[in-house]
Image (cartoon, rainbow, N blue to C red):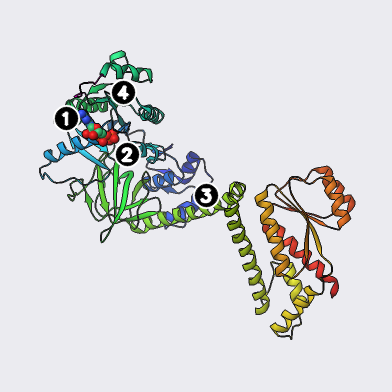
Amino acid sequence: QVIISPSMTLSNLATQMDINMNTLLYALRDIESNNKLDQESFVSAETAEILAHEFNCLPTYPQKEAKFPLRPPVVTIMGHVDHGKTTLLDSFRNSNICASEYGGITQSIGAFSMKTSSGGIITFIDTPGHKAFTNMRARGAEITDIVILVVCATEGVQPTTLESIRHAREADVPVIVALNKIDLPNADANRVELQLLDAGVELEKFGGEVMSIQISAKKRMNLDQLEEAILFKSELMDLRADKTGFARGTIIESKIIEGRGSLCSLLVQKGTLKPGDNLVSGNVYGKIRFILNEFGEQLKEALPSQAVEVTGLNDMPDSGNDLIIVSSPAKAKAIADRRKNEKEREEAEKKEKEVKIVLPKLSYQERRGLRTQKTNMIVERLKDELEQVKAGAELNAFRDLKKIKDKLGKGMSFEENLEKIQEMFSDKEEKSINVFLKAQNFGMLEALEDSVNILGREKNVPIRIIQSEVGAITSQEIEFAKEQKGVILCMDLRIPRNVMAKAQKLGVAIKSHKIIYHLLADVNNLILDFTEPLY
Ligand code: GDP
């Protein structure tokens, strides 16, 4: 949590968010054009709030909260399949159409707001209940205020009913039970209520706080009672939001409509959303062109708890992502770009890690694929290196190639030099480089084995893999390596101290690295040492 005040300094903000000043200044550089900021500079509430979001902190304005106006409840309907969720939503939606002065057709925008007969407003989230919970937890901000748990009065509590109860409890969202299909002759509300009690739902009837309404979604029985229960609960919850200032909210759904670009439904949770606003959500941004309600009518603004559809974004933002409005298009782009870069970096990092962890679990076929990919990369790299020799470029990175280059005649043509390189390697055929391969698991071992073989082939040097095994190096292996005049190549393994001591004593080289390229660089050096004495 970060408490935002109108006059706060950067150092105050950094302390509250528990981050390093430089990190904060770095992030700020993308958002503010003023380069002369330091820790004593003041930040605007808007910037502070954006930064809080960037660093996963929850911005709050405690001193004002109580005076904010009431806002409508946001409701999600959950329950077991076939218990009547869709029918209930449809009934609400249809009564909504009648209530609308336009009497239009609602479009599915993932949410809709309805006016009850008593004049209250309720916003229903119209995506499958579980998705609403799993996807829509944007940085701890739940979008649902109340869950309507639909339970069929003939079938009673079912697995998904229990799951829904658990979801609601975990999210700390209150439940109202709708006992559905009471129009059916075999409906047994009492039995189902006892089942619910068993499942830990403390119904009012049994002294608890959970309201339970008997309805028929299909025959539209007691729906007004359910509406009133929702409004009553929401009053108790005292749901309020500041409707001044830039909007904050959550993305519900988005899609691309041919010819219209991206269309995105969202829930406003705070502030007022207006056409022309510069929106950012994740790494998607844009100037809002139109704000539409579920009837497709253009709106001049959208207030807290209102679900609307907007156009004008450059792409489809992810469901459940939060959205912010900033003061200029440039700022919106800068924030989105920054997040995009961050995301790409994270994904690249994750990918790197994944290859390592996933390798042993892959099928043989998949492993082959990965290995081919890896070895192809190495081959490509080696080709590159040769090209550089060809171009006579300065080579700093690879000792071996530098050495080769030093050996090459300055006045000779590339072809002549290439011949010389080949000579260097081919004269050594009767001998070989003897290696022992060790790795933590078979996946790594195979990758290493392949790469070493390819390197040997590419450089035309006989590399003999004497032994290739998984697991820590043993002292027997050191002795064997000594006997065979071999080098031990060890990938991502800890070397026991006594083994290391023995290797040092016997003069056996152990090359140990976490990354295959580093190990292969060592192999390159071995190749070079192997060809060296010729000249
Ligand atoms: P969902 O899977 O939870 O969305 O369930 P549906 O809304 O699709 O309803 C499943 C079936 O139950 C449909 O055939 C509905 O017509 C029927 N149904 C829903 N509500 C009622 C009700 O109140 N009474 C009766 N008799 N049938 C209902």
Question: Residue sitting at 52 percent across and 49 percent down?
Answer: 23
Is the distance from the Cβ of mark 1 to the nearest ligand 1 atom less than 8 Å? Answer: no
Name the N-terminal-most of marks 1 and 2.
2
- The span from disc 1 to disc 3 (Cα, nearest Å) is 57 Å
Place of residue 18 in the rendered image (x, y in percent of width and height, measured from the top left): 51, 40
Figure quarter occupied by ligand 1: top left
Amino acid type, mark 4: Gly
The response on whether ligand 1 sits within 8 Å of label 3 is no
**Whole-number angstrom distance, CA of label 2 to CA of label 4:** 20 Å
Task: Classify residue 458 as left or right of residue 349.
Answer: right
Please provide percent x and percent y for residue 103: 11, 44
For badge 1, the amino acid type reads Arg
Q: Name the residue under label 1.
A: 220
For the record, the magenta segment spans: 182-188
Residue found 62% across the figure and 68% down from its top: 380
Q: What residue type is labelled 2?
A: Pro
In this view, the residue in front, 517 or 248, is 517
Q: Amino acid under label 3?
A: Thr
Q: In which quarter of the image is the N terminus?
A: top left
Residue 70 appears in view:
no
The picture quadrant where one finds residue 224 is top left
- Check disc 4 and report the residue beneath it: 156
Q: Main secondary structure of the magenta part?
A: loop
Mark 4 close to ligand 1, CB under 8 Å: no
Q: Alpha carbon of mark 1 to alpha carbon of mark 2: how far? A: 21 Å
Instruction: Measure the C-alpha gap from mark 4 to mark 3.
Output: 54 Å
What residue did someone put label 2 on? 128
The percent coordinates of residue 329 (x first, y second) are: 34, 58
Which quadrant would residue 219 be assigned to in this image? Answer: top left
Residue in front for this viewpoint, 192 or 155: 155
Of mark 4 and mark 3, the one earlier in the sequence is 3
Rounded to the nearest angstrom, the CA distance separating label 4 from label 1 is 20 Å
